[in-house]
Image (cartoon, rainbow, N blue to C red):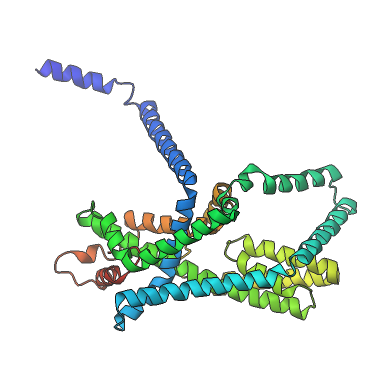
Amino acid sequence: MEYRDDTSAAQYRSSPWKDGLGRASIRSAQLLLLIAALVVSVYALIQVRLLVIPLLLALILAAAISPLVNMLRRKGWPGALATAFAFLLLLGVLGGVVTGIVFAVRGQFDELVSRANEGFDQVYEFIRTGPLPVDDAQIQEARQALVDFATSATAGSTALSGLTAAGTFITGVLLMAVILFFFLKDGDRIWAFMLRGFKGERLRKARLVGFRSLEVLGGYVRGTAIIALVDSVFIGLALFILGVPLALPLAVIVFVGAFVPLVGATVAGALAALVALVANGPFVALMVILAVVVVNQLEGNFLQPVVMGRSLSIHPLVILLALTAGTILAGIIGAILSVPVAAVAWAAIKVWTGEDNPGLDAREPGSDGPDADAVDADAADSNVGDP
């Protein structure tokens, strides 16, 4: 018996999978398997994007409006009435914003496109004939690459272009409205159903994940809306003072662009500068660029930390990577959704790894930890994301 044990131990130690290369091979195989599972999952989600995108939009909007529902319930409103009021209020606000954007841009859209093209042509001519050693073929190649991307299958087959068809778009909007209503009405029950397989500490962590996700999504939407409004007002005011034409539609574009972090406001500011270059000359265009830079710096250094708080506590490089991946997978809609999804994923990782779990230790019997009570209370009251 001892001989066989010694022989087995020797064979175990001499196994090719037990040395450094063997362990690295096992880890590599596991990593490749995880990547394959991730690719298959992303591919499957893309195939049902007409369901996934309305679901994500409804979840984000529900997280933003759920504090109002909870406040109305605490004031004695019946649950159904509070849900219906918040739901109709949100739909009215969204409808008003979309209608205002359409009316502000539609009448001057052709002129805006024409001015932007003229400004681009002027910049192109300056680069082509200027002191910079840039070959005309290189400029044409870069321009054609941008055009090819805008008209390629990558951009043309995304969820955004799919939803531009009238029937598909209406279906997506109606589906989002229905999902949003049920999230507001029964979000706590939905989340409790999803957590039925968790027990003990895992259940407590899962509840905290839901609470943090709701907090991050709601804070992100409300904070982004405030930042977008401030950016559009101040940049639009600067355009009006400088006498730049099309100031109103440009301010609207700044408002919409602010929902795409890092690059949205920059692209909108570049468009405003191109219009100013054509209509007012290079000096005013330079002043427009300066105004955009100043507003963005003030927003990034002072306003965003206040209104966002912990909602977007991820590194700018992660935001950029998420934006790129979201744009490739789902166009503009993907760019808008990628950052809050990445923020929620990071918040969930921090909770699950123990970096952000203030209530877990305090939840033991006999403990009176305030964080635990707050998490339990918020989880019980929440309409979206927590039982």
Residue 284 placement, left or right of 337: right
Identify the residue at the far left of this view: 1
Image quadrant of residue 279? bottom right
x, y (%) of residue 292? 69, 70
In this rendering, is residue 19 above or below 84? Answer: above
In this orientation, which residue lies closer to the viewer: 98 or 289?
98
**Which residue is drawn at the image coordinates 49% and 51% (left, top)?**
50
x, y (%) of residue 229? 59, 75
In this rendering, is residue 195 above or below 77? Answer: above
x, y (%) of residue 242? 78, 78
x, y (%) of residue 92? 50, 74
Identify the residue at the far front of this view: 167
Examine the rendering and report whether any part of residue 310 can be seen: no
Q: In which quadrant of the rendered image does the N terminus lie? A: top left
**Which residue is drawn at the image coordinates 53% and 71% (left, top)?**
94
**Which residue is drawn at the image coordinates 63% and 47% (left, top)?**
156
Q: In which quadrant of the rendered image does the C terminus lie? A: bottom left
Image quadrant of residue 343? bottom left
